[in-house]
Amino acid sequence: MWPVAKKGFFPFYGLELILNLGFYFILFDPNKFVEFDLFMLNSSMVVMTLLFDWMSLIFVSFVMIISSVVSLYSSGYMRGDMNILRFMLILYFFVFSMVLLIISPNLISLLLGWDGLGLVSYCLVIYYQNIKSYNAGFLTIMVNRLGDVSILLAISWMLNYGSWNYIYYMNSFICSFEYHLILLLLVMAAMTKSAQVPISSWLPAAMAAPTPDFGLVQPSTLVTAGVYLMIRFNYPLLSFGFSNFLLLLGMLTMLMSGIAANLEYDLSSIIALSTLSQLGFMISTLSMGLYVISFFHLLTHALFKSLLFLCAGSYIHNLFNIQDIRYMGSMFNYMPISSVCFNVSSLCLCGIPFMSGFYSKDLILDLLNMSFINCLIYFLYFFSTGLTLMYSLRLFYYSMISFSNYFPLFSSDNDMINMNISMILLLIMSVFGGSFLMWLNFPFPFGFKFADLFKVGSGNICYIKWCMYFGFFLFSFLMLNLSFGLYSLSFFFGSMMFMPYISTGFISFLPLYKGFILSKVMDQGWYETIGGQGLYNLFIFISLYIYSIFDYKYKIYLLSFIFWIFLLFIFIVL
């Protein structure tokens, strides 16, 4: 193992202590605050406060697990890279920023972790120095700046109340309009970080980063930071009436990303859109007041989605950076371990019984059946959830069933011991992690008793839903080969409803174009004409005019010289 990667496996050593503390806090539910006196400023003590409860400790332990496995995986994937030391250091700083965000009950320290995530994600997106990475990095950093500005405004507004420790003001957030404004700003920040509609296009663009990066960044740290922030503010958010807005937001994100994933051929983009769909699933679950179950799904999703990203990275690594799934076929014959892990993680994503994703998704869907929502939301929720099965079947078909369309002399890299070990570790946790967390968080089993009519209706709905699954699955294969009208429709949904073009136009192209116009008109136009360049041209014109007068006209030159001497003499005498 590469030395830095071996040392980078250090989070695993402290994992046992953090995980045991998390189990203790789940059982006895204590909340511990640790305060550090940093320095004195104008007779006021600046204090650093850290919050340790069951939620923060369990989340930190999962971040440590995934970062340890990704560190081990990177030693094989990034082998031969000249800048692997820089990559590993950036990755560890990313983990540090996420841990700081998780354990911060203070908006100032939360902003440090929040801004650190945005900065390091930008550095990782532009790790490969090409024009595509630069454009993706610019879009990523600009969108994340919007969230940073929202948190800065919330910090400035909370200054009126004498403290930035938001954890002490949870009951006050539902009392006044000023606190509601803070909640609105925090929701805007969470939307930017979790890539919700209408600012979702930066997440697929961030796939320009190395595979170990988005194996850690996408499912467990960066994009879940917004969901975690809203979970912390769940009580005031639902009390103020944000539930309908969050439900609509999550539904649109699930629907848009699910359809786009069924029409995409880039492997990393499909998995990124899958992550986007699951984020919408978490936020819509949170809108129903199920914040503990939403957090439960966040943890299980972090495990199997990290495994899915690492398996995709193994495919890309062996196919020499080919990401088009149409080139992939019969992958089980070349890479059996990666293929088994890939299919198991896909089963977890679909919520197949007794996989980790089943325990959270099935519980959420059962509780949805018991909630008071209209039929349209109910249909769209189940349809958007079913889209997960569609693109998972599509991935399975192209990677396993279809014939290999790669070069005939292709041979896989068998020297992937570290990569295989890391995938097997995540495979074990993905299979058993859901049941373990389920029995730990909910020791008493849930029982649901439905009326007979609803049982028959739910059976019919399931039958219709499965027919729709396979119908849309076949339709996604045929859509691009049909008439121009269907091609236009597929282009509309496949491009995330034109969100990349809209966000690029409003976030990247439009400000750059306006800045270019202002630079040409003002900085290089009027300012130069009125300022230094204008004075320079004026002096040149006057000098040329005087030169033209005195050119070969010695009498005029001598008369003017005598005239100026006479004026100078009069001025001195008088």
Image (tube, helix red, strand yellow):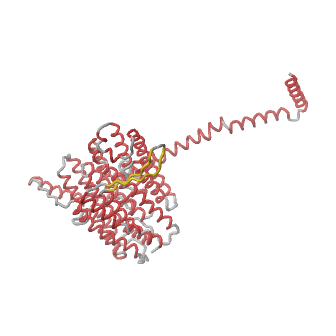
Residue drawn at x 59%, y 38% is 522
From the top left corner, tell me how far across and down residue 327 is, in percent. 39, 68
Q: Which residue ends up furthest to the front in the rendered image? A: 43
Q: Is residue 341 left or right of residue 560?
A: left
Q: Which residue ends up furthest to the left in the rendered image? A: 452
Identify the image quadrant of the N terminus: bottom left
316 over 98 or under it: above or below: below
Residue drawn at x 65%, y 38% is 528
From the top left corner, tell me how far across and down residue 40 is, in percent. 47, 47
Residue drawn at x 11%, y 56% is 449
Instruction: Depth check: give the residue in front, 298 or 480.
Output: 298
Instruction: Depth check: give the residue in front, 262 or 347.
Output: 347
From the top left corner, tell me how far across and down residue 31 is, in percent. 30, 54
Residue 259, visible in the rendered structure: no
Q: Is residue 36 left or right of residue 534?
A: left
Question: Where, by quadrant of the figure, is residue 565 drawn?
Answer: top right
Instruction: Depth check: give the residue in front, 235 or 387.
Output: 235
105 over 302 or under it: above or below: above
From the top left corner, tell me how far across and down residue 326 is, in percent. 37, 66
Residue 438, visible in the rendered structure: yes
236 over 2 or under it: above or below: above
